[in-house]
Amino acid sequence: MRRSRGFVVIALSLIAAGLALIAWKVNVYGYPLTPNSMSETWTVQARLRVRPGDGPVGVTLTLPSATPGFGRLQEDFVSRGFGLDVQENSFLRKATWTIRRVSGTQTLYYRAQIYRDRNQQEFAPVPAYPDVPELEEPFATALQSITDEVRSRSANIASFAAAVLARINSASPSAEIRLFLNAPEFGGDKVGIARTLLAGARIPTERINGFLLTEDEPNATPVTWLAVHNEQQWLFFDPQSGRQYLPENLLVWWRGGDSPVEVSGAELQRLEWSVRRNEIGSLALAEQRAERHQFPFVNFSLLSLPVQTQSVYSVLLLVPVGAFVMVLLRNVVGVRTFGTFMPVLIALAFEETGIGAGLLLFAIVVALGLVFRFCLERLRLTLVPRLTAVVTIVVILMIGLSMLSARLGWEVGLSVGLFPMVILAMVIERMSIIWEERGPQDAVLEGAGSALVATLAYLVMGLEQIRYMTIVYPEFLLIVLGLTILMGRYSGYRVTELFRFRDLARPAEST
Amino acid sequence: MIGRYLALRRAGVLGLNGRNARYIAVHNPRRFYPLVDDKIRCKELLRQHGIPVPALLDAIRTQFEAGRLGKRLERLEQFAIKPACGSQGDGIIVIGSRRNGLWLSPSGSSYYSLDDLEFHVSGILNGLYSLGGQPDAALLEGLVLTDPRLRTLAPEGVPDIRIIVYRGVPVMAMVRLPTRRSGGKANLHSGGIGAGIAMATGRTLRAVMDDRVIDSHPDSGLPIRDFEVPEWNALLELAAACQSAVKLGYLGVDIVLDATHGPLVLELNARPGLSIQIANQTGLEHRLKAVDGLSIDLERLSPRDRAALAMELAEGGWRPARARLAKTVPLPVAPRPALASPPPEEQPLPQRHAS
């Protein structure tokens, strides 16, 4: 007998597809895997105060562009009466505020929401080799001797740069270094000196200006970092210690030694930077990112639907999970239930009523319904009218229970109306038939089995993680589908069969 | 748990999932189900193939007809009302006699007015007993008068013989005996007794009631064990012939022994239950595999040959190696040659005779 194994392939590819989609969303878009996980974001702000002159005023601010390790969410420009123009090319962004005529001190704001994004690695374009700086004596000779000396003691560009920085920061610098440190042209700017020395060896460098994002900092001061290109990638150095690293929380704002602000027709009175740390839900962050960057596919997320539709789907998406629980209980454990999906629907009703009250109400309605159903039996109704009568009785019972519990102040009792009444009517009908045909024992057993499955399905559907997975990662259902297909071909024993056939498990001579 | 799981597997016990996935899904094409599930069609089909069935007295298909049941019942004395698509013996009323305008069950323990019967038929038509609640038809069937030779087994009610036929070869059988508690039904889950039958000899093995082994009938106290089922060869042949008629590879055949008409096929079942393994105290799957292991084209064998093959396989202890000899051994089977092989494990018949 040959049996196809195709279903395994289909099931495993469904599961793999589901897992891959989830992994993609987690790694690329930063969707969190667990509910309630929080992410850090920062609000960085530049506040410029300018006193305008008589003519037109133009203020240009360099904006963060390529920020390794961070991404931008939302940017705000606050400026009363100014026209705003943002120029953007791949590694440089500038905002220009302009106004023809204005009087009095003006305050301009730029504010950006920053979040951590490990996929963001761009920094600056691949640079050209710098020319050897043309310096006057004695600087030219000193530069020559420093580069010669360092080159003889370093292996590559990284160690060269580290050695240069070490010499600049040395407690007892050499005479040549001291010459540079004391030169008025450099003003003791160690990054500037290092760039000049490295340019002497034709090594491309960049000055980085940015902010350390930590706690709230109402008056942040920019920090300077040194980037060195080693012909393959940018290496980052701490100009103070000479160590090669880039702080995890350094937000790169602008490059170069010039001020990020250019003002024309006015006087820049103050330039203030501030950093504020916020915490927002990782999910909300991922959603905002997706929206901002127009990610494909994620835009079709359920979270982009209207909230009311979402709440409908959040329930719908749980049904397959509950149904899968039922598959396990029926085909692997062997629990007997009324109908195929009745327990899942009851479990959905439990969602609203809560489990204790739900089971109690279920038992009360079914028990009372059975009593009335046995009375109906004597009236000899044909099937469909009888079912309709049972539905009507169920509705009357539910109303009665609600009114009674309202009188007694038992609030949960009011939720009885959430039970699927047609399903309840079918349960009562089926149960009464089994009661008559096979006896009360079987009927109660199957009723209890249904309640058990409903309870377990309810518990699984109530798991926060499961709810979260289904709504945030609808592709989770592909995994459920794959597992269901696998279960569909499970041909081993059910747990109940281990008991049913227990005598047959003994060795054959016992017969 | 795992130990018992493996033990059951070693014993070749077939579970519901295994039956559905490995046998029913493979050997029972769904398009043939209606032939079996509808008792009226099934009866017709079997009759066309020359297989004896209890007489179809009448079929009621509409509520209109159900309302005029009295006319139809006028000329009938003894009959059974059954849903055409019922399952597990539900919805069956058996009438043995008529007195004072009331219909009585054969034991006389319950009686029905015309109203009762009309209501019952109407319920059947509405699909009360059919799978999935689909509209159904009711059939009136001639009453089976049990062969007196079976009276010692079943003091009342109609015992029937369930034979599992796999790819045309009968592989396992039991006789189902109604008890007072089962209300005349022979179904095991309604409290009937199931007694396994040795396929090679047609003698009953131990009996089981409610999954417990018993040795005598709880109503009469008469022994159930080691009873020789009459006309065993004919029953096997009849069961094998049913497979030729409906083309279901995994089939349950229910046969009754009528006092006047002999063996009659009562109904066929495309999803026969697994309790027969408990009644036989042995697993089914070894036997199914033995049939699968045969190198004979089973399609070509006549029902008679397949019945003989079943008895031969049983004698050989359902081992595929022995079964392959079947082709060469002439029928009827010669006494088993003293092979150097150990005695079969699951059929310790000789001891049973001795005890």
Image (cartoon, coloured by chain):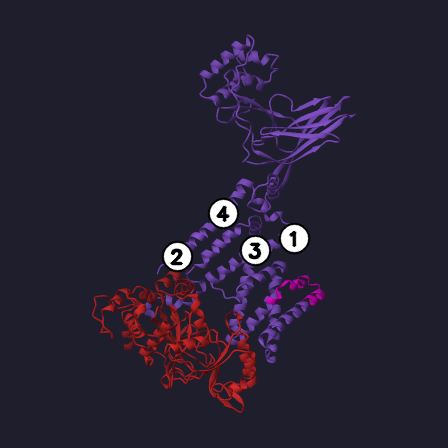
Chain colours: A purple, B red
As helix, strand or loop, the secondary structure at mark 3 comes to helix
Q: Position of residue B1 (x, y in %)?
A: 42, 60
B12 left or right of A194 in image: left
Extent of the magenta region: A401-422
**Picture layout, residue B222 above or below residue A310:** below
**Picture layout, residue A210 above or below residue A410:** above
As helix, strand or loop, the secondary structure at mark 4 comes to helix
Distance from label 1 to label 2 (Cα)? 44 Å
Return the residue at label 2: A4
Badge 2, how many Cα within 10 Å: few under 14, some, many 20+?
Answer: few
> Which label was assigned to residue A454?
none
**Quarter of the rendering containing residue B169:** bottom left
Distance from label 4 to label 3 (Cα)? 18 Å
Q: Earlier in the sequence, mark 4 or mark 1?
A: 4
Q: What amino acid is at disc 2?
A: Ser
Marks 4 and 3 belong to one chain? yes
